[in-house]
Image: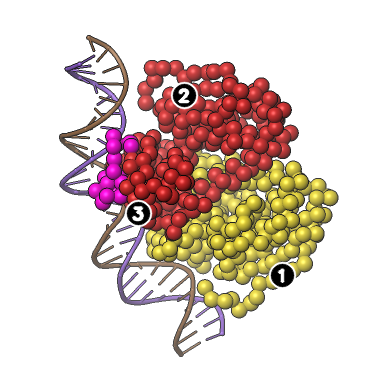
Chain colours: A red, B yellow, C brown, D purple
Amino acid sequence: MQATPQISQNKKADSCADCPIQHRAVCAYCEKTELLMLEAMKSYKTYNAGETIIMAGDEMEFVGSVVTGVASLSQTMEDGRRQMVGLLLPSDFVGRPGREYAAFDVEATTSVTLCKFARRPFEKMLEQTPRLRERMLEMALDELDAAREWMLLLGRKTAREKISSLLMIIAKRQNTLVQIEQASNLKFELSLTREAMADYLGLTLETVSRQINALKKDGVISLEKKRHVVVKDVNRLLNETGDDADGGYFT
Amino acid sequence: MQATPQISQNKKADSCADCPIQHRAVCAYCEKTELLMLEAMKSYKTYNAGETIIMAGDEMEFVGSVVTGVASLSQTMEDGRRQMVGLLLPSDFVGRPGREYAAFDVEATTSVTLCKFARRPFEKMLEQTPRLRERMLEMALDELDAAREWMLLLGRKTAREKISSLLMIIAKRQNTLVQIEQASNLKFELSLTREAMADYLGLTLETVSRQINALKKDGVISLEKKRHVVVKDVNRLLNETGDDADGGYFT
DNA sequence: CGAACGGTTGATTTGTATCAAGAATCGTGG
DNA sequence: CCACGATTCTTGATACAAATCAACCGTTCG
């Protein structure tokens, strides 16, 4: 939680043509001329793991897209109880256009590179660019669906189901569908600490630890290096999530 | 859960000019000519309390707005565990444009009147009408915020805090801000059963009953007729929610 | 009237939090 | 490269909030 040794880096932006998230980010539907406008107003910044990107209540000077890394969106109560309300992966959007003050904390979970746009110019362009708004709407609706899935998890799932669901979600996002469906041996890097998982799942970190080790003991997963998970049997893990059939994981 | 005696009613639509939700619904920003197009494709339907409006997995033939009444959006697990993921009040939108099959159950909590649009024509108009898309985006972002607030509630709040939060939310929506801020005696109709509240809050109905009666015993609220709540001291209730200061209730 | 529904209340169980200690891992500087 | 302190993670004992199981009450309505 202390000041990190390295300093987060500002960088002149690369061309949108080389952007790794160009097909999934807010700008996905933009035409060349529109991309040129965005290029003129964008800049990259890299944050170190653990660094705070935005604090709730801060004035929102920028919005942007996650280019690489994992960031988290969370809320904290006065007495310190914390709940993560979003996991921001590459191509996810940060910030709400039209909002002056941040409603949630945004933190870099791993090292994170953002493609930032000054808020005002971006808002103005959003007004004038149907393609941008269209993608924005799509993304907002997708996030809303994800949030609602998460509400079921938080409200009704057991600790073991919560952990299993989280593992499936991360596995799904880090591997292609094909790999998941065939593979009976699926590996991935778990870039969250036990505490971050607890904040996401509405549990304590002790419970997270116990449940992960229970899944390991039961042969559903195995661990290499604490944060590196090997799923021995994907269908077994899927059953543990409490979701029916494919639980939408393969849709 | 059985067929209700009365039959839900289809009705030729009223003019948009007389619509009680015209300033808050998806169509809020539409111009006269656009409203005329919507008028041509809309129809009203009234559902009885308890009736299912849409079942998860159904083909979505329509989208629409809640005109009067309260509906709920919820998810059910195979073993019957249920979680409400949205409370639909007048002006709220039902359905996701671009989606063919419903992802959630929609049920009438009270008697509900919907202003329905056939999905395809509506989607087509959405593509061609920036004002409609703009309002849609705003509403989706607002819902996303609400969903994230709810995630904090589900993941981290105690039963008592959950109940208090729900009461505040309903009080806030059924009364004007002015009334809330001044009034030291705030009344409202609680249109949810204990079971529906439990589904919303991620609790059992017994816990809901106990906590409501605890708040009553502690003099925070009093009850007339089980579903009619009188808040004796709004600030007292606000403190019980666990949210800081005004908790965004007055913003 | 009697069944069905919504609500209350009590006794008991249980899953997860809390408190506490220690082990493993990581990063840093000597 | 090793030693250190600091994180991160594990594991155990205990406490507690809410779930579960169960009985009962009041309304409503056919």
| Circles 2 and 3 on the same subunit | yes
Q: What number is the disc on residue B176?
A: none
Q: Which residue is mark 3?
A: A236
**Image location (x, y in percent) of residue A80:** 38, 37
Give the answer, above or below, for where A15 lies relative to B30: above
Q: Chain of mark 2?
A: A
Q: Is residue A199 left or right of residue A59?
A: left
Residue bounds of the magenta highlight: A210-228
Quarter of the image where the N terminus of chain A is located = top left
**Residue A220 counted in the magenta span:** yes
**Image location (x, y in percent) of residue A227:** 33, 36
Q: Which residue is mark 1?
A: B10
SS label for mark 3: helix
Q: Which of marks 3 and 2 precedes in the sequence?
A: 2
Distance from label 2 to label 3 (Cα)?
37 Å
Q: Is residue A46 left or right of residue B112?
A: left
Instruction: Give the residue type that dot 1 points to.
Output: Asn
SS label for mark 1: strand
